[in-house]
Image: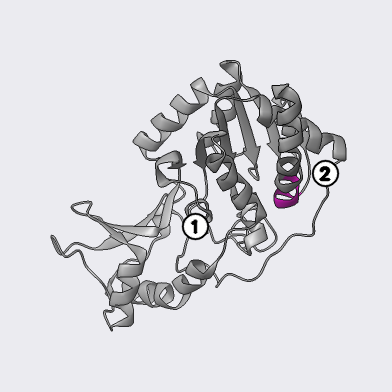
Amino acid sequence: MTVSMTENAPTEQYPDPVSAAPEDLTNLARMIAASERMVVFTGAGISTESGIPDYRGPNGVWARNALPRADNQPQGEDAQRRMWEFRRKNYPQMLARQPNAGHRVIANLEHDHKLFGIITQNIDGLHQKAGNSPDRIIELHGSTHTLRCRNCGTEYDGITIQQRLDAGEEDPRCTVCGGPLRTGTVLFGESLPQDALRQAVALAQVTDFLLVVGSSLAVNPAARIPQIARQHGAKLAIINLAPTPLDHLADLLIHATAGPTLSGAYAQLPAISGVAGQ
């Protein structure tokens, strides 16, 4: 979720759990066990279990007509001050969000040397907080925990700017050139960071198994990543509550809640890996 003037403060938004079929959990565990270069592609659906509404849910920005667009950002000194006051009050809520079971399983897969990389559309930083290495995470839409100068591009940590706001600054500026700061997230109407997109495409071209978790796969060019992986011979599994435009490409399709599904499959890995190693 992007912190912006047009959004209400986040509310607790935990989805009703939808269970996966036992055979789907087993099949997912088998796909994970068989993979040597597994890549996970995550969207907002994995973070709803951490209380962060997704864009297309009932409390999301689509439903509230509150899309954070590049062309509707605050203009003028008064609007800037209101934006920063909004962030000062609401950013701590994002900082307080915690990884859920789905994030923790993905972190465990890295620790088990089963994860080649993560491509995420999320800006919440929960993969890092769960324990995944930042070096393995490609944030296609940036991060709400980073801000940057509009003029010189100098980046600032969100906590550093929060401290400046709490200390009384009404419109924090770049300490290098004095320029205005903006969110490190990609707004609607802006292009994805080219380096991040190139890295994501490169991962999609070499992975042997792409696992999509909680993405509607409706926003391009990010949604083309699973297609690229499939074209290069990778297996594809999709875990998402609602159908996606790429369901027909999936080797395994699970319409269920992300956290319990990943946890259930992960719990079967030791037995399946043991059988495969015999």
Q: Nearer the viewer, residue 183 or 96?
A: 96
Is tag 1's residue or tag 2's residue first in the polypeptide sequence?
Answer: 2
Which residue is identified by label 2?
20
Name the residue that disc number 1 marks: 129
Reply above or below: 24 against 249. Answer: below
User: Residue 275 location in percent, x, y?
Assistant: 76, 26
Q: Label 2 is placed on what type of residue?
A: Ala
Residue 42: quadrant of the picture: top right
Residue in view at x 72 percent, y 29 percent: 274
Q: Is residue 136 above or below residue 161?
A: above
* Displayed quadrant of residue 36: top right
Front-lying residue, 193 or 188: 193
Residue 158 x/y as whole percent: 36, 64
Q: Secondary structure at mark 1?
A: helix
- Type of the residue with mark 1: Lys
Overall secondary structure of the magenta stretch? Answer: helix
- Give the residue at x 41% y 46%: 134
**For the residue labelled by badge 2, is the local secondary structure a helix, a strand or a loop?**
loop
Residue 252 percent across, percent down from the top left: 75, 29
Label 1 close to label 2 by CB (< 8 Å) = no
Answer above or below: position of 187 versus 157: above
How busy is the neighbourhood of tag 2: few (under 14 within 10 Å), some, or many (20 plus)?
some
Q: Is residue 193 visible?
A: yes
In which quadrant will I find the C terminus? Answer: top right
Magenta stretch? 257-261
